Amino acid sequence: MQKEKEMKQVPEPTIKRLPVYLHYLIKAREEGAMNISAPAIAKELNLDPTQVVKDLAYTGIKGRPKIGYNIYELIHFVEEYLGFNKVNKAFLVGAGNLGSALMAYQAGQTLGLKILAAFDISESKIGTKTGQVNVLHMKNFSEMVKRLDVTIGILTTPGDVAQKVADEMISAGIKAIWNLTPAYLKLPENVVVQNTSMYSNVAVLLKRLEHSEKII
Amino acid sequence: MQKEKEMKQVPEPTIKRLPVYLHYLIKAREEGAMNISAPAIAKELNLDPTQVVKDLAYTGIKGRPKIGYNIYELIHFVEEYLGFNKVNKAFLVGAGNLGSALMAYQAGQTLGLKILAAFDISESKIGTKTGQVNVLHMKNFSEMVKRLDVTIGILTTPGDVAQKVADEMISAGIKAIWNLTPAYLKLPENVVVQNTSMYSNVAVLLKRLEHSEKII
């Protein structure tokens, strides 16, 4: 059963939509909903109902005809599937504004990640704290990755040092890098990289606004 | 000519890659490069050379056989195409950590956007300043959108008020919203929305790391 699930291919758009469902479902639960149907979710989020059923099926949940999903059960399945209720330990490198924003996120809400510490080389940042996250000197990074068995690195340095820091992360034992810098990283094939470039998102926004070209 | 360009369909992955090229090209220019070839760019960024040629062709640039592109010319074409060297006026709503990170970005580097002001309802934030951006009371938003002819709204509020604030943005005259909240927005069809959910990006990262399922 597990084996079968492991073999299933999951489209990236589905994985990106699941946190959107989750956000909506938590809101609906707070408003007192007990059951919710795929068409109701679809209507609220401007999606196709068939798509919603398909997306949610990846989590292993089964809806009941005419009743839909039990909302508590559904939230549990989505969180479980996304790994948001596990502790995914992460270190952040680059305690600037974007880094601090992510550290502060921790305080109020879960991001599916637990940022255990942040690292920087700037003396003015070392020893400070944002949310519950302390900023430490980068020279301690490698030893602490090993000691705390951290696998995820969040990269929020300036773009021009991103590659160098990413290389340091990998040699310390980091297995997955969330790259929020504008730099493109060249890394070994077995390293997982998720790029979230603010620039790329702005580029798409501006192009769409321009209306001069249709984005396909 | 312009007409013809207007009709061309541009794939979103191309638009997302162009800022990545730009970042690399600016670095290469700083290191003294005068000309650069598509295969050289492709090698550096782990892309297919044919893809690079296709992507860059959308900007209207023409490379020369054996020489490649003049790097100054290429940077100019990419910037021009992305609208990064125009002033794209934006207002930001929600001067929390993520909002402040974006405001601070302005100081050091261009994001293709000029954040003219930020808005919030929290008395502790109103009157403060991050980078060069002042935080004003949200009650002034609508009037200032009209007065300064701002078309882009950056949404960095908590998720539970995102829809309400987005509605306010639209009725004030905003035409494009960059949504950095986890909320899904229901908006009129003619409004441009670009979603950058930190949660969705984390979800993809965690799933990839898990290795249990292949993302397609």
Image (cartoon, coloured by chain):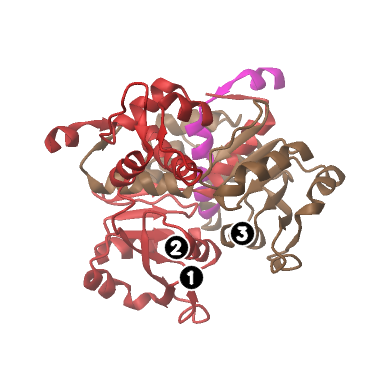
Chain colours: A red, B brown
Q: Crowdedness of circle 2 by 10 Å Cα count: few (<14), some, many (20+)?
A: some
x, y (%) of residue A170?
Answer: 28, 60
Look at discs 3 and 1 and give the one toward the viewer. Answer: 1
**Is A96 within the magenta?**
no
**Residue tagged 3:** B105
Give the position of the N terminus of chain A as an image quadrant: top left
The Cα–Cα distance between marks 3 and 1, rounded to whole angstroms, is 21 Å
The overriding secondary structure of the stretch rendered in magenta is helix
The residue beneath circle 1 is A131
- Cα distance, mark 2 to mark 1? 7 Å
Query: Would residue B208 be found to the left or right of residue B90 on screen?
Result: left
Disc 1 residue crowd, few under 14, some 14–19, many 20+, Cα 10 Å? some
Q: Mark yes or no: residue A157 visible.
A: no
In the rendered image, residues at marks 2 and 3 fall on the same chain? no
Tell me the residue at 75%/54% (across/down): B138
Q: Is there a contact, CB below 8 Å, between mark 2 and mark 1?
A: yes
Range of the magenta residues? B1-27
Q: Position of residue B10 (x, y in %)?
A: 55, 26
Q: Chain of mark 3?
A: B
Name the secondary structure under disc 3.
Answer: helix
Dot 2 falls on which chain?
A: A
Find residue A14 and report its horizontal and vertical position in percent: 37, 33
* B206 or B9, nearer to the observer: B206
Residue at disc 1, secondary structure = loop
Q: Which corner quadrant of the image does residue B130 belong to?
A: bottom right
Q: Amino acid at mark 1?
A: Gly
> Which of the pair A92/B85 is nearer the observer?
A92
Question: Mark 3 belongs to which amino acid?
Answer: Tyr
Q: Quadrant of residue B30?
A: bottom right
> What is the three-letter code of the residue carrying label 2?
Gln
> Percent x, y for residue A142?
28, 72
Q: Residue A106 has which mark?
A: 2
